[in-house]
Amino acid sequence: MKRPEFLVDFSEAAATTPRDGLPDSPSFQRNHRPILDVLIPWLAHRSGDVVEIGSGTGQHLVAFAEALPGLTWWPSDPSAEHVAIIARRRSAGAPANVMPPVVLDAAVDDWGLGTDGRPPAAGLAAMVCINVLHIAPWPVTGGLMRGAFRHLAPGGCLFVYGPFKRDGAHTSPGNAAFDESLRARNPDWGVRDVAEVEAEANRAGLQLAETRSMPANNLTLVFQAGA
């Protein structure tokens, strides 16, 4: 399988722990608790299935599954290499509500859900997407929003975390420098503007229900499917 061009190597994004040989993402260590603080008010009272888009090391999903055991959590990633690492993490002692990871490319319009060993095709309680949009070509944003609309239950939520511009401007000098470095590596990458992401969501049938400021000049955007 061809490796998607927008993926960041684990060697760049994470250190390997000597204990189990699994990648340990520094960004997970910094941000999983603040992201969970956003998820809990929306999801603590819900049951059903949650799909993470672009699970990477799988650490976020495992932590969320531990904190929200009433939900069934499905990791996914466009890279078979990453999926294999997530499968190893699951086998190493993930909670029982963590399902086997699946290969899923958010940019395409057929995610293949509802088949054997994959998440349900409809009625998902939520979807989570962390640190993906700025290291993916812009069509991934539209594909994510259309997929969320297809697969979320009425009232279900899509949580999108990462760095964003607001009204065309960066929220910090650090984000501006980060954006420049991303675009230098790949002109299809870059920090996205909240308004443009929201417009894609609206075209797909989702509404922006919450914008939460996060540590280190990041945001969590919560999009909701119509009731």
Image (cartoon, rainbow, N blue to C red):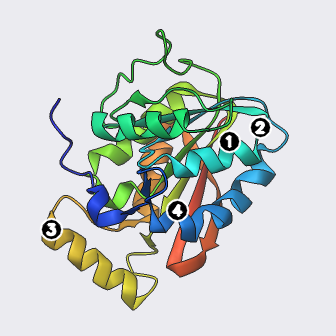
User: Of label 3 and label 1, which has the lower sequence position?
Assistant: 1
Few, some or many residues within 10 Å of mark 4 (<14, 14–19, 20+): some
Judged left or right of residue 203, residue 33 is: right
User: Of label 3 and label 2, which has the lower sequence position?
Assistant: 2
Image quarter (top left, top right, bottom left or bottom right) of the N terminus: top left
Spatial CA distance of label 3 from label 1 is 34 Å
**Residue 131 location in percent, x, y?**
43, 59
Q: Amino acid at mark 3?
A: Arg
User: Of label 4 and label 1, which has the lower sequence position?
Assistant: 4
Mark 2 and mark 3 in contact (Cβ < 8 Å)?
A: no
Mark 3 and mark 4 in contact (Cβ < 8 Å)?
A: no
Mark 2 and mark 1 in contact (Cβ < 8 Å)?
A: yes
Q: Which residue occupies 67% across, 64% down? A: 33
Report the front residue among 94 and 219.
94
| Residue indicated by mark 2 | 69
**Residue 119 location in percent, x, y?**
54, 22
Judged left or right of residue 73, residue 6 is: left
Q: Which residue occupies 39% across, 24% down? A: 111
**Res. 61 in view:** yes
| Residue indicated by mark 4 | 28
Spatial CA distance of label 4 from label 1 is 14 Å
Spatial CA distance of label 1 from label 2 is 6 Å
Mark 1 residue element: helix
**Res. 79 in view:** no
